[in-house]
Image (cartoon, rainbow, N blue to C red):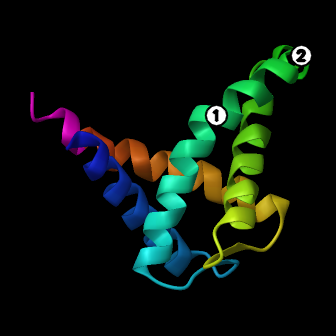
Amino acid sequence: MKTLLRILLTALAVVVLAKVLPWVHVEGYTSAIWVAIALGLLRITVKPLLIFFTLPATIVTLGLFLFVINAVIILLADYFVSGFQVDGFWVALLFSILLSFLQSVLFSFLEKDK
């Protein structure tokens, strides 16, 4: 149940950011849900591999290279989900930072249920 709520809250954050950022386009709410599912799957499968292979760059930049990895994950979601479009790497970087912030705010409401 909590996973479903996280997917729906991520989809809500994607829709909100698509309305705020003119360089991010989402066709509808179903596309936003597919983006949330794709982001979840990419974060589980691809992100650990990218972190492993770019570990020296991550260490040298004191972890700031993880922002680049998050932007690559957003661009991969753009590639796989047809109703989602991000207009470039820098927009994906900004989108990933704002999405992480919004997710932390929205997911904090789920933690208060304990």
- Front residue of 64 and 110: 110
Label 2 belongs to which residue?
A: 60
Q: Residue at x 75, y 65 (%)?
A: 79
Q: Which residues are magenta?
A: 109-114
Does residue 38 appear to the left or right of 62 in the view shown? left
Q: Nearer the viewer, mark 2 or mark 1?
A: 1
Q: Position of residue 64 (x, y in %)?
A: 76, 30
**Does the rendering let one see residue 3?**
yes
Amino acid type for the residue under numbered disc 2: Val
Label 1 sits on a secondary structure element that is: helix
Most foreground residue, 35 or 93:
35
Residue 19 among those drawn in magenta: no
Q: Which mark is residue 45?
A: 1
Residue 46 is situated, as x and y percent measured from the top left of the image, at 70, 36
- Hey, which residue is sitting farthest left in the picture? 114
Q: Is residue 113 magenta?
A: yes
Picture quarter containing residue 75?
A: bottom right
**Residue shown at the point (62%, 43%) measured from the top left:** 42
In front: 86, or 43? 43
Where residue 111 appears, as percent x and y from the top left, is: 20, 33
Q: Quadrant of residue 41?
A: top right
Residue 43, picture quadrant: top right
Which residue is depicted at the point 19% across and 44% down? Answer: 1
- Distance, label 2 to label 1, CA atoms, is 24 Å
Horizontal side, residue 28 vs residue 63: left or right: left
Of helix, strand and loop, which one carries label 2? helix
